[in-house]
Structures are given as C-alpha cells and as structure tokens.
Amino acid sequence: MDIAASSAVNGRAPAAKAATIRDVAERAKVSVASVSRVLNGSDAITETTRQRVLDAVAHLHYVPHVGARSLSTSRTDTIGVILPDLYGEFFSELIRGMDLAARAHGKHLIVSSSHGDTEETMAALRSMRGRVDGMIVLSPHVRAANLAADVAGRTPVLVMNGGLDEGGRPAIAVDNHGGAVAAVEHLIATGRRRIAHIRGAAGNLEADIRAEGYASALVGQDPIIVEGDFTQAAGHRAATQLMALDQRPDAVFAANDMMALGGLLAFQEAGVRCPEDVAVVGFDDVPLAALVRPTLTTLRVNIAEMGRRGVERLIGLVQAGANAEADTACEIVRPALVVRQSTAAAATAGSNPDQTAASLS
C-alpha cells in the first residue's frame, strides 16, 4: 500500500506539497531570478513584475527557504550574542533591549553564555560562525573579547565590556570609573565618612575598575573592601562581615544592585537601619532597585537601551560590509546617579523615592 492510500485508509488527507520558488515563477510567468530579486527587495525589477510575483506568492502560500536565501544573499538575518551569564536582572534587561531592536529590524537572536570563561567564549563563537551575520561579545575580560574579535574573521563583531577597547575595535563600554567616583562623592556629600565597598568577582574587568574608582574618590580614609561576585548572596555575606567590624561603616557602595540588595536584606535582618545607620548605593539600576524598601540609590546605566544600541550598531556594521570605512569607535555609556531612599538623611528617608537622576559629565 502506498503512502497516499495509507493516509486515506486512516482518514487523513495526504499533506500538500510545499510550493517552491519554481512554482512561483511558473505561475507569475517570470524567471526564477526575477522571483529571487523581488523576494530580496531588489530595485532592478518593474512594478508590474513585482506585483505578479507577490500575487503568486500569496496564492501559493509560498514561504522562502531561509537556508537557501542565506546562500544567495550571504545573510542569515540572525545576530549572535555571547554573554558571560544568562542569569539575573541585568542580563534579562540587556537581552530584552537587544530582542526589541532585532525584531524591529526583522532579525533574530542566538544567545549563548560563556560563564565568564575565555575557552567557553571561543567555543560559543566557533559554534556561531557561518550561522550569524554578526556577533555581540560581552566579556568581563578584555583578552577574551579581543580574541573573540580575532577568531571571528570576517564576521563583524561588536565588543561590549567595562573598559576602553585598546584593540581599536568597535565597542560599547560603561564608564565604570566615573560611576564609582560619583557614588562615593554622593555618600561623602551626605555626611558619610566611613565608606565600604563590596566589589565584584576577582579578575572581572568591571569589578576592577569600579573598585579603583571607589578608592580614588575616598577622602581621609583607607579603603574598606569586601570581596563579592555580583550575586545577592555575596552582598548578604559581605554586609554581614562589615557589621562584624570593630568600626562599622556608615555607608556601603556595592559594585552592582544585586549585591546592594543582598546587603540591605542583611542589615534589615540585623536591625541595622538604612539609611539612618548605614547608607547603601548600588550600580546598574535594575528594575528591582526602585521596588524594594528603602528604594535603592544607584548608578543608572539604562541596560535595555544599551542592548538596543548594541544591536543597532552591529546591524550598521553588517550592512556596511567591507566597502565602508572601518568603524573602530568605542562608544562610552555615562551612568546617571539616581538618588533614592537608601542614602537619604534620616529626616527625609520617607520622601520622594526617586529624587534625582543626574548624568555624569
């Protein structure tokens, strides 16, 4: 019994054969090349021919084969994104911004995590070569980011990390040093004189630069630094260590919001009041920072906007191709200090939870 007969016996009609580009060409009475030009948006076609092809496509319910189209156009309409991690509010917001921009341009994302490891960054990059039109690499290590750009070959790569890219590659970087200085100067301005820092993971570029900015802005005190790893649990542990000191700090600058939130929880559990006993500042301005009580003073990076800008910048690199003048600019994102309840004076601790948002100059 053949397949068609078997389907009929089982009460199911045989599946209709999908229309091909040759079927479209035959119905529109044009060449396959003309159909391809219409589908690829070429201007080298008459309006009459274009309409005949589009009518045939609609009648036949033709869906272009993505793989075949990428072979003829050398484009996949796909962007690769390599992140150090996929967990947490920061990366969730970053991917959200990237996805919105990609969809607006008719592109798709392939996202992979390197877990902050150079070798895994290389493995993720090699797996994407030939499958994407360009790649965004966000790495906590400059070496990994530069190696990724080298290994990618002719595939456009945009590097997103915490330091200036000395390799002369297209990049987007946060002014981590300036943001840390602004955090400490704000705490000094509110009268705090014993300011501690919960730093990020050892060897992480952004953590190193934020710690350097913290230390450079101190006035009349030695640095008080407790190790962390950018997680809420690390912030909780670090705050517990700080409370055990003979001289407890009256302010804490955490290298990101999640550690700051962990610190706030530890202080609340110990009966230490914020901001009356200790002021707290974070970095990033994740959505949760404005929802906790007290609301968290932080450095706003506008994470989703940075993700959107990264995708749009990469699309520009892809569209420019080899004929355009090389884009080697490092675009700097300036954080904005957002003052909320966690650093307010005791008399104003219950006031407007989002008092100021001033960009760094």
Image (cartoon, grey):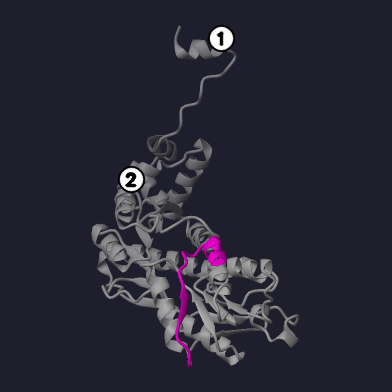
- Which residue bears the numbered disc 1? 9
Badge 1 marks a residue whose secondary structure is helix
Task: Identify residue type, mark 2.
Answer: Ala
Which of the labelled discs sits on residue 46, or is there none?
Answer: none
Residue indicated by mark 2: 33
Q: Where is residue 210? Give x, y as percent.
A: 44, 77
Q: Nearer the viewer, residue 191 or 340?
A: 191
Residue 158, image x, y percentages: 35, 66
Residue at (33%, 71%) from the top-left corner? 170
Q: Which residues are magenta?
A: 220-237
| Residue 217, position as x, y percentages in the image | 46, 88
Calculate the distance from the C-alpha at mark 2 to the C-alpha at mark 1: 42 Å
Secondary structure beneath disc 2? helix
Q: Residue at x 56, y 9 (%)?
A: 9
Amino acid at the residue labelled 1: Val
Residue at screen point 48% across, 81% down:
180
- Camera-side residue of 261 and 159: 261
Taking 260 as reference, is 360 above or below it?
A: below
